[in-house]
Image (tube, rainbow, N blue to C red):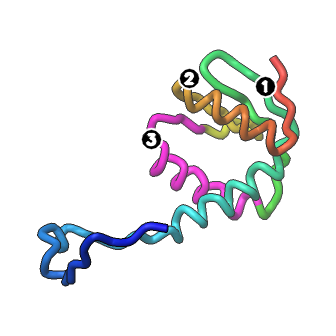
């Protein structure tokens, strides 16, 4: 058990940086996770290539409906990762740390990666 040595009354005016504190809206991040789920449900194969991965996609209407938004949000939050759609293949290129994490994410989703 711990007993306080002192109690101090603190008001918002006592915080000198309160005018620099802002809110946080997770709605865009949540939307990104939602549409990423749509994309990754349609991955039919993944292969390791120099500097990244190629993901073979099963293209359908639900994927088409969210794909542009997926690219826009992905680029906004991870600008150093290149994503490009070529035919029905999503090409992903990026820094080594991202690629390592991305491969683990594929594994967690049950997507096997071939060389």
Helix, strand or loop at mark 3:
loop
Closer to the N terminus: mark 1 or mark 2?
1
Q: Name the mark on residue 47.
A: 1
Closer to the N terminus: mark 2 or mark 3?
3
Q: Residue at x 13, y 81 (%)?
A: 13
Q: Name the mark on residue 79.
A: 3
Measured in 3D between alpha carbons, the distance from the residue under mark 1 to the one under mark 2, in whole angstroms, is 16 Å
Magenta stretch containing residue 77, yes or no?
Answer: yes
Disc 1 crowd, CA 10 A, few/some/many (<14, 14-19, 20+): some
Q: Residue at x 58, y 28 (%)?
A: 93
Q: Depth check: 2 or 91 in front? A: 2
> Which residue is label 2 attached to?
96
Q: Quadrant of residue 19?
A: bottom left
Helix, strand or loop at mark 2:
helix
Disc 2 crowd, CA 10 A, few/some/many (<14, 14-19, 20+): few
Residue 20 point in image, percent of width and height: 19, 67
Contact between marks 2 and 3 (CB within 8 A): the answer is no
Residue 32 point in image, percent of width and height: 60, 59
- What segment carries the magenta color? 63-83
Q: Nearer the viewer, mark 2 or mark 3?
A: 2
Magenta stretch containing residue 56, yes or no?
Answer: no
Q: Quadrant of residue 103?
A: top right
């Amino acid at each position: 058990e711990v007993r306080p040595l002192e109690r101090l009354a603190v008001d918002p005016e006592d915080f000198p940086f309160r005018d620099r504190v802002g809110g946080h809206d997770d709605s865009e991040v949540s939307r990104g996770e939602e549409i990423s789920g749509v994309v990754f449900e349609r991955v039919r194969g993944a292969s390791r290539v120099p500097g990244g991965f190629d993901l073979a996609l099963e293209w359908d209407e639900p994927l088409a409906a969210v794909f542009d938004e997926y690219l826009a949000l992905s680029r906004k939050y991870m600008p150093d990762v290149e994503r490009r759609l070529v035919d029905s293949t999503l090409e992903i290129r990026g820094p080594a740390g991202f690629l390592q994490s991305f491969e683990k994410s594929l594994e967690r989703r049950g997507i096997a990666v071939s060389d």
